[in-house]
Amino acid sequence: MRFAKGHGTENDFVILPDPDGELQVTEETVRLLCDRRAGIGGDGILRVVRTSALGETLAPAARTAERAEWFMDYRNSDGSIAEMCGNGVRVFARYLLHAGYVRGDRFEVGTRDGAKGVVIEPNGDVTVDMGRVERQGASSAKLARQVVHGAQISVGNPHLACEVEGPVADVDLTQLPELDAEAFPQGANVEVYTETGPGVLEMRVYERGSGETRSCGTGIVAAAAAATPEGEGATWRVRVLGGECTVYLDASGARLSGPAVIVAEGETVLV
Ligand SMILES: N[C@@H](CCC[C@H](N)C(=O)O)C(=O)O
């Protein structure tokens, strides 16, 4: 089976081209492909399938995805399905261009959170219109060595974005965060962030289904939203372990911009 490998600020993905929806991607397959020793290695999988060949009924809120020719079927490295992946969309867009599946510098990608508009910037960065960012109140999480408090935010998928004092490097993210199950019945991604200068955040993330990763696009947007007073617009540069992205927040929602690259292509015998 053909595959590619790509990343957006080192949030890395195994890309499976499956235009006609012929692959059976099981949880076990995903775990094996994402395994960094026994497989190819990645934080998740991006299956590249024509929306018309998806073979899945989308939730009513995601039906706008049907107008996009290509659908990003995203899976976390543990095999679970997530509604959205911000860096995934950016890498997916880069792959569509690389493979010649799309042309031009503006197109849409279908996701389980609906259609997302993508723009290829003159400097090569990929910007995705993430749509609405929903603030849902406050909650907390128990980490390995501390309890953190923050904002419950939906960017299509669930987040708890927590401002911490001191460097984010000091936060122990080695263990699965314990969350309030009533607030997060489907689990959540947990971000810790601190403001290091005007318009600049530093962030780390423990991703649902993947553990600590070096970047998370939806998490970057959630942290930027949590750091912005409600009702206000803002632009944030968000530094993560794998690089930096920029978030533009306004009344219509959020845009996420940053690098996205394809680093390898080949064939795997794992599937
Ligand atoms: N890395 C992604 C988020 C992937 C999904 C997440 N782990 C979840 O389960 O919600 C991003 O760049 O947004």
Image (cartoon, rainbow, N blue to C red):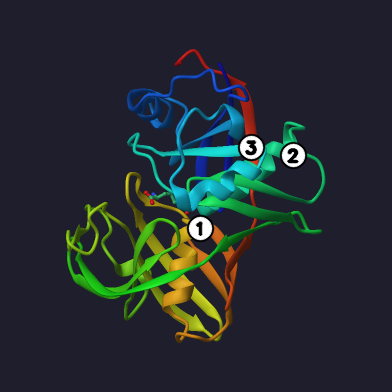
Marks 3/2: CA distance?
12 Å
Q: Quadrant of residue 67?
A: top right
Q: Residue at x 81, y 59 (%)?
A: 122
* Neighbours of disc 2 within 10 Å: few (<14), some (14-19), many (20+): some
Circle 3 is placed at which residue position?
70
Q: What is the residue that sits farthest to the front in this orientation?
A: 60
* 206 relative position to 62: left or right: left
Q: Position of residue 27 (x, y in %)?
A: 34, 28
* 81 relative position to 87: left or right: left
Question: Of the numbered discs in the image, which one, if any, rests on residue 25?
Answer: none
Earlier residue among tags 1 and 2: 2
Q: Residue at x 29, y 67 (%)?
A: 171
Say what secondary structure mark 3 lies in: strand
Marks 3/1: CA distance?
20 Å
What's the amino acid at mark 2? Answer: Leu
The response on whether ligand 1 sits within 8 Å of label 1 is yes
Circle 1 is placed at which residue position?
217
Residue 241 is at least partly visible in this image: no
Q: Position of residue 23 (x, y in %)?
A: 50, 19
What's the amino acid at mark 1? Answer: Gly
